[in-house]
Amino acid sequence: MPKFKETDFQFHTDIASTGYKKYYSHDDLDNVTCMLFESKLSQKIQTKVENFNKTERLNLLEESIRTVMNMVPHDMESFRT
């Protein structure tokens, strides 16, 4: 799957830019086959990256993605099979 371009991120904060894409089967456009979530640290955070250890940076990204996942309507059970 291709990486997000800058224009693909739907949500921007002082901490991170986050977005999602839905992928559908060619045969069935009513059902989502896959959802891709991606987040990257903002320029403000990147310029001060030495103030954050790897775990803190990962937590910032994880919380950004978790927030967007809770905002996007989807049925996680269908992706777990």
Image (cartoon, rainbow, N blue to C red):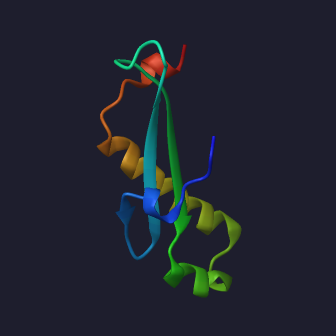
Residue 1's x, y, as percent?
Answer: 63, 40
In the rendered view of the protein, which quadrant contains the C terminus? top right
Residue 20's x, y, as percent?
Answer: 44, 46
Relative height, residue 64 to residue 24 (above, below): below
Q: Which residue is depicted at the point 55% across and 55% down?
A: 4
Q: Which residue is depicted at the point 62% across and 46% down?
A: 2
Q: Quadrant of residue 13?
A: bottom left
Relative height, residue 32 to residue 41 (above, below): above
Q: Which residue is depicted at the point 36% across and 61% down?
A: 11
Relative height, residue 16 to residue 23 (above, below): below
48 displayed left or right of 21: right
Residue 35's x, y, as percent?
Answer: 48, 34
68 displayed left or right of 81: left
Between 70 and 59, the one nearer to me in the picture: 70
Counting the numbered discs, the total is 0
Q: Which residue is depicted at the point 49% across and 19% down?
A: 25
Residue placed furthest toward the front: 26
Residue 21's x, y, as percent?
Answer: 45, 42
Q: Quadrant of residue 41?
A: bottom right
